[in-house]
Amino acid sequence: MSWAVVARKDFEDAARSKMLWGITVLFVLATAGTMFAVGSLTDDFTAKQAIGFLSSPATLLVPLAALVVAYLAIAGERESGSIKLLLGLPHTRRDVLLGKLVGRSLVVGVATVIAFIAGAIVLAVQFGSFPVSDFLVQGVTTFIFGMVFVGIAIGFSAMASTRSRAMAGAIGLYFLFELIWDIVPVGVYYLIEGGMPNVTDGLPPWYFLLQIINPKNAYSVAANFLSNPSGASPYAQLVNGTVPFYLEGWFALALLALWLVVPVALGYWQFERADIS
């Protein structure tokens, strides 16, 4: 398995990133701090409910860690010329792309595990109990979320020919998903309805579809669904009329799968045709 060789080497190289471990420290502090705050500031939540708050620091820091660790995965080696040496070994371009996806996803996964262990310790101390299954569901969903952003970064890196373009793309992607995207549903609603959206009056389903397409929002919905598969959609009280299929929890999982597969596939298509001589 040639891709596994690439993944192992890439994991070792990416794990040395000082910026990544700086973000990991922030993630640990944010996760532990969130559990401490939820347990200390109010008595209204159970340990199971508190676990849901872990998505707040995760949506901010997991994409950042993933983009930092993966944006130069291929573009950096193309510019330095080391990609020629890598492809000179018995590795195809598909092996390189898949190996880097797996290797760098594992790096982000390790950072996530460290942060969640810190959160688990604080959770157990604060609440005196520890719902293992719910915590594992949140952790696995967060790992998938991190892998999605690694895939997005790997795909973009495969399409970029220089480090500067890859860096610009990573910065742009982070701001797109963390800040800019939230404005899109509001803007579209204003153009169509001629006013600002008001959740208390109910909103059309397409408004929330525009929200859930963002992988960070899909992650939150998917985590909620996996922790309670038989529960009602989180949008049940927010939409006018019946909740459509695309606002159900399983659809959020499908969106995460698409966000993982499509950017990597597009990156591979471009990388396979690129002249790296």
Image (cartoon, rainbow, N blue to C red):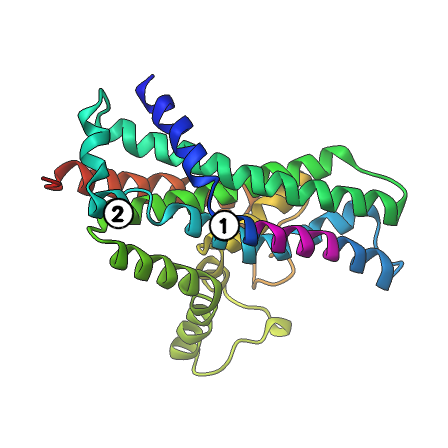
Can residue 228 be seen in this snapshot? no
As drawn, which residue projects farthest toward the top? 1
Q: Which residue bears the numbered disc 1?
A: 18
Q: Is residue 117 left or right of residue 154?
A: right
Q: Which mark is drawn over residue 75?
A: 2
The percent coordinates of residue 36 (x first, y second) are 80, 56
- Secondary element type, mark 1: helix
Which span of residues is magenta-colored? 24-34
Residue 96 lies in what quarter of the image?
top left
- Whether residue 182 is situated above or below residue 112 in the rendered picture: below
Residue type at the position of mark 1: Lys
Of residue 233 and residue 11, the one placed in the foreground of this image is 11
The percent coordinates of residue 101 (x first, y second) are 38, 36
- Secondary element type, mark 2: helix
Magenta stretch encompasses residue 33? yes
**Figure label count:** 2
Magenta stretch encompasses residue 61? no
Residue 98 lies in what quarter of the image?
top left
